[in-house]
Image: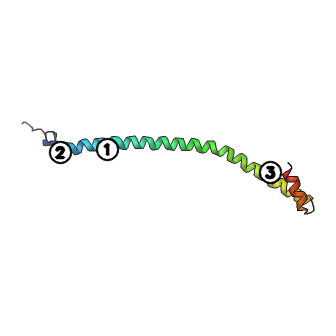
Amino acid sequence: MVYARPAVLDNPILLAPATENGEIRSQLAEAQGQCVELAVNAGELNAEVEAPRRELAEFLRFDLRFFLFVASHAHCNWGVIIGICTNL
């Protein structure tokens, strides 16, 4: 028994969509790779930003504790409190 070749391989009208589909799949794979790379970069950037953010938060907590300490020992003389806190 002899089998005939599929008509798709000989027909350019039917072959064009298959070729286009392959090109689109290739573009999709490239875009997916770029998305993965972007996600990795975003994670690294987040890690770089997180450390200074923590340091700033700790500094602000210390600054607030110091301000409240001075306020509690200055008998509510706000001029003295502000003067002390601005001359650090």
Assign a secondary structure to mark 2: helix
- Describe residue 35's horizontal placement relative to residue 6 as left or right: right
Callout 1–callout 3 Cβ contact below 8 Å = no
Q: Depth check: 76 or 57 in front?
A: 76
Looking at marks 3 and 2 on the same chain, the residue that comes earlier in the sequence is marked by 2
Query: Mark 3: which amino acid?
Result: Phe
Q: Which residue is mark 2?
A: 14
Q: Position of residue 60 (x, y in %)?
A: 76, 52
* Residue in the image at 35% along x and 42% along y: 27
Q: CA distance from mark 1 to mark 3?
A: 56 Å
Residue 46, image x and y in percent?
Answer: 59, 45
Give the label on residue 62, or none: 3
Badge 3 vs badge 2, beta-carbon distance below 8 Å: no
Callout 1: few (<14), some (14-19), or many (20+) C-alpha neighbours within 10 Å? few
Q: CA distance from mark 1 to mark 2?
A: 16 Å
Which element type, helix, strand or loop, lies under badge 3? helix
Using a 10 Å C-alpha cutoff, classify the residue at mark 2 as few (fewer than 14 neighbours), some (14 to 19) or many (20 or more). few
Mark 3 surroundings within 10 Å by alpha-carbon count, few (fewer than 14), some (14 through 19), many (20 or more):
few
Quarter of the picture containing the N terminus is top left
Is residue 43 among the parts visible in the rendering?
A: yes
Mark 1 or mark 2, earlier in chain: 2
Left/right of residue 44 with respect to residue 65 in the rendered view: left
How far apart are labels 3 and 2 at the CA level? 72 Å
* Residue 69 locus on image (x, y percent): 87, 56
Disc 1 secondary structure class = helix
Which of the numbered marks, if any, corresponds to residue 6?
none
Q: Residue placed at 80% from the left, 52% from the top? A: 63
Name the amino acid, label 1: Ile
Where residue 75 appears, x then y in whole percent? 93, 62
Q: Quadrant of residue 68?
A: bottom right
Mark 1–mark 2 CB contact (< 8 Å): no
Say how the picture is coloured: rainbow
